[in-house]
Amino acid sequence: MLKRLLTSIGEYFLLLGKAIKRPQKSSVFVKLFFREIADLGVNSFGLVLFTSTFVGAVVAIQMFNNFTASSFPIPLSFIGYATKVVLILEFAPTIISVILAGKVGSYIASSIGTMRVTEQIDALDIMGVNSPNFLILPKILASIIFNPLLIAISIVFGIYGGYLAGIATGSWSKADYITGVQMYMPTHFIWYAFLKTAVFAFIIATVPSYFGYNVKGGSLEVGRASTQAVVWTIVSIIIMNLILTQMFLS
């Protein structure tokens, strides 16, 4: 088991070494890059907006319940502040990245895996094309560039979701919530959130690519590789989340 894991990690980094090189044809690469922006990023807008709005509402309601249950009086304005901080530090970067790992990761693994079992990747290699660079690098750059934008939108709509929860429940006033959102927060919290997002985006693009690229067999194996890709991508995100939190917030 350990030997197999170490072998897979070695193969993963060898594949990255082939993928992260200068593209052979810039015009082709730019076309592929913008296609990946659409497939991996733009098509995820709806899911991110929907999830973030409801997550923000749930966080705000939980904060209200915790504050009102406290034996010490806590101003209701802190609901907005706490919701903002929790969304920026954890919920938006991590939860949305896990959701994207399921949606985007399965797509990447299945699309590359299908190319492998239909021998399209072999055809690229025979023609002298660096297939890892051709298939994986556009996905890496598209994810690293576009995912922070998705997370920024997620934070905004999460905060707005908390605002809507206040209107719907009447538990706190609009003025209190807005005052809390406007409270000072350390700037490095925001930098930490987007650094974490970029690391997660790299994982989301590369781990499923590894599983798809190394598929052996037929369509059944492609499905299994997609499932494994999603599982290991989420595991990698959780582990890196712990490491980055320890490094930058401890």
Image (cartoon, rainbow, N blue to C red):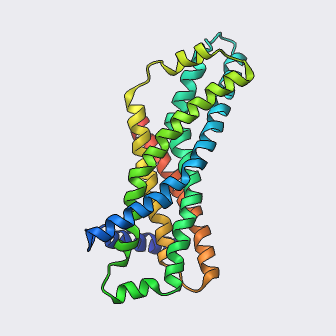
> Between residues 66 and 190, which one lies in front from this camera angle?
190
The number of discs equals 0
* Residue that lies at the very extreme toward the bottom in this rendered image: 126
- Judge whether residue 53 can be spotted in this image: yes
Q: Quadrant of the C terminus?
A: top left
Task: Please identify the quadrant where the N terminus is shown.
Answer: bottom right
Q: Is residue 48 above or below residue 11?
A: above
Residue 138 or residue 202, whichever sits in front: 138
Seen from the viewer's position, the closer of residues 144 and 63 is 144
Where is residue 16 shown, x and y percent of the image?
36, 68
For residue 222, side relative to residue 7 (left or right): right
Could you say where residue 136 lies in the image, as x and y percent from the top left? 40, 68
Left or right of 40? Residue 21 is left
Q: Establish if 158 lies above or below 128.
A: above
**Furthest residue in direction top, as rendered:** 73
Report the residue at 45% width, 54% height from top: 201
Asked where in the image residue 143 lies, by quadrant, the reply is bottom left
Nearest to the observer: residue 96 or residue 10: 96
